[in-house]
Image (cartoon, rainbow, N blue to C red):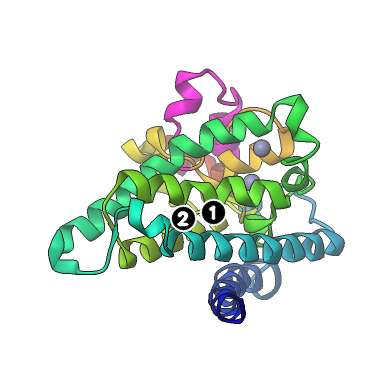
């Protein structure tokens, strides 16, 4: 038991440091240091209250603890015997490190869409996902602000990935890191996508910060995590998304530039 606690404390310390670093730096840059500079990129005019930040940080730490326990369970016996986690890079080569990281994100996107919609069901919402939606105006601190039960549901994707994919420990780290960085962007509260993004293929397939921000301000629609695929297929995409996105980008780059860019 002492050994278990020692490992959990170790994983938690690394993960919590990562949270404070990867959510804290954008918070410092966008909400404190260069606030005025980025004013036009702000998605919602109003600011969230200090109490929101405190609630978000406390719940994010709770989620970090849950995710640390999930990580421990996935990497330990007896689960280690049924998952496909490996440690010898030569087994599948370096290309599979990149390949399995990308595939993990794709699996997580599908898992997240359906889990997210399930948690929006009225029988479950109040007891799980409502906590995340208390942040109607999200900030980087919102990234891991989940109810205790939702944190387990979020972490469960690691079991699924490790069950279906041979995945190296390094790819697990890259996957969780990439996932967290995109999550911080989704909750940033500022649209920082470059102008060219609007006319690219990427705009049609991936979500933006505005996309997830709309989910927080309107509660329904835009359930996707990285891609627009499931929302489009299931007709759950917010119909005002593109208009809202263009409005913010027009404020940032000027109407002429945006329309010239298409
Ligand atoms: Zn939601
Ligand atoms: Zn969110």
Is the Cβ of the residue at disc 2 closer than 8 Å to that at disc 1? yes
Tell me where residue 180 appears, x and y as whole percent.
51, 59
| Quadrant (top left/top right/bottom left/bottom right) for the C terminus | top left
150 or 58: nearer the eye?
150
Q: Quadrant of ligand 1?
A: top right
Q: Which residue is mark 1?
A: 183
Tell me where residue 204 appears, x and y as whole percent.
39, 32
Disc 2: CA contacts within 10 A as few (<14), some (14-19) or many (>=20): some
Residue pictured at 57% horizontal, 63% vertical: 69
Indicate left or right for 135 with 23 as reference: right
Judge whether 184 appears above or below 10 on screen. Answer: above
Q: Quadrant of residue 68?
A: bottom right
Tell me where residue 122 appears, x and y as whole percent.
76, 25
Marking on residue 37: none
Q: Quadrant of residue 139?
A: bottom right
Residue pictured at 54% horizontal, 37% vertical: 246
Indicate left or right for 24 with 90 as reference: right
Marking on residue 179: 2
Judge whether 57 appears above or below 167 on screen. Answer: below
């Amino acid at each position: 038991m002492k050994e278990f606690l020692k490992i959990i404390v170790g994983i938690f310390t690394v993960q919590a440091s990562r949270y404070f670093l990867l959510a804290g730096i954008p918070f410092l840059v966008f909400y404190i240091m260069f606030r005025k500079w980025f004013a036009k990129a702000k998605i919602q005019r109003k600011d969230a209250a200090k109490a929101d930040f405190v609630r978000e940080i406390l719940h994010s730490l709770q989620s970090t603890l849950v995710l640390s326990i999930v990580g421990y369970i996935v990497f330990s016996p007896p689960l280690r015997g049924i998952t496909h986690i490996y440690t010898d890079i030569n087994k599948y080569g370096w290309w599979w490190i990149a390949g399995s990281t990308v595939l993990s994100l794709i699996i997580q996107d599908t898992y997240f869409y359906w889990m997210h919609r399930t948690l929006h069901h009225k029988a479950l919402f109040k007891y799980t996902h409502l906590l995340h939606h208390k942040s109607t105006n999200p900030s980087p601190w919102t990234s891991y602000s989940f109810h205790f039960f939702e944190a387990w549901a979020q972490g469960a994707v690691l079991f699924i990935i490790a069950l279906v994919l041979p995945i190296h420990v390094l790819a697990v780290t890259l996957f969780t890191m990439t996932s967290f960085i995109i999550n911080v962007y989704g909750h940033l509260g500022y649209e920082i996508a470059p102008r060219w993004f609007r006319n690219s293929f990427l705009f049609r397939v991936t979500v933006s910060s505005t996309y997830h921000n709309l989910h927080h301000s309107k509660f329904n629609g835009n359930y996707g995590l990285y891609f627009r695929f499931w929302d489009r297929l299931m007709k759950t995409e917010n119909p005002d998304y593109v208009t809202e996105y263009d409005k913010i980008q027009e404020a940032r780059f000027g109407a002429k530039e945006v329309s010239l860019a298409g």
